[in-house]
Amino acid sequence: MKWYPFATRWLKTSQHRESLHSILLDVTFLSDVGYRNTENKKKFFFGAVNDKEFELESIDKEKKLAGFVTGEVLGIEDEMYVRLDVGSFKHQRIYVLLILFTLFGVGLFIQGFLQILPDQSKTYLLAMGGVIFLLLAYLFMISWKFSKQLRYTVDFFRGMYDAEVIEKKDIPSVFLL
C-alpha cells in the first residue's frame, strides 16, 4: 500500500550472525542513561539489539531514516536473511486511530453540512472542517515522508550489511517456520 506508513522488506546477506550483530551495535546505543560517545562514532538508533532480533528507534538528526525499525535475523552460517519492519510510528494502531478519528470527523462534517443550521453552528462546522483538513494534511505528509524514508532506510541497512533486497518467496521455507 503506497500511502500506508508501514512496510516489511527482506534482505539477504552472506555475513554471519555475529557479524550482523556487531555491525548493528556500532550504530546503536542501548541506554541513554549516562551515555557518552567516547568512540566518536555516529549513532543512528536507540533500542534493543541481540543476535536474533532488534527493535530500534531512529535518532538520526537529518530525519532521513524512518522513525522505527524492528527486525529479525533468520538463517544459518553464511546464508542469513533479515526481515525489516519499518514504520513511521512504533505501533500501527496509532495510525489506524488517526485514520478512524479523521473519517469520523469527515462523516460528521458532511452530515452537518447537509443540514440547515443557524449561523453560529455553521461557524463551528467550518472550524471543524479546518481541523479535519489539517488532520488529512498531516496524514498525507506522514505517508509522503515515509515513502522517502523507507527507501533510505532499506538502502542504509542494505549497505551496512552488504545485502541485497529480496522477496519473501525467495527465502527457504525452513527459515520462516
Image (cartoon, grey):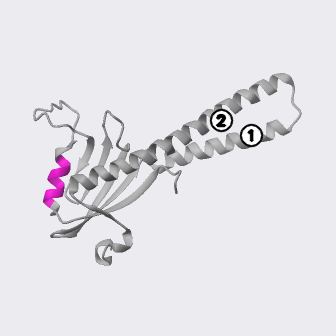
Mark 2 Cα within 10 Å, few/some/many (few <14, many 20+)? some
92 with respect to 73 (left or right): right
Q: Residue at x 14, y 52 (%)?
A: 22
Q: Amino acid at mark 1?
A: Leu
Q: Looking at the magenta stretch, what is its main secondary structure?
A: helix
Task: Name the foreground residue: 41 vs 35.
Answer: 41
**Residue 22 covered by magenta stretch:** yes
Q: Which of pointers 2 and 1 lies earlier in the amino acid sequence? A: 1
Task: Name the foreground residue: 101 vs 83.
Answer: 83
Q: Position of residue 49 (x, y in %)?
A: 23, 50
Name the residue carrying label 1. 108
Q: Residue furthest left?
A: 39
Q: Position of residue 27 (x, y in %)?
A: 20, 44
94 with respect to 18 (left or right): right
For residue 50, what is the image quadrant? bottom left
Q: Position of residue 134 (x, y in %)?
A: 61, 33
**Residue 69 covered by magenta stretch:** no
41 with respect to 167 (left or right): left
- Distance between the Cα atoms at labels 2 and 1? 10 Å
Highlighted range, magenta: 18-25
Relative to 166, residue 136 above or below: above
Q: Amino acid at mark 2?
A: Ile
Quadrant where the C terminus sits is: bottom left
Q: Residue at x 28, y 62 (%)?
A: 164
Name the residue carrying label 2. 132
Q: For the residue labelled by badge 2, is the local secondary structure a helix, a strand or a loop?
A: helix
Q: Residue at x 55, y 48 (%)?
A: 96
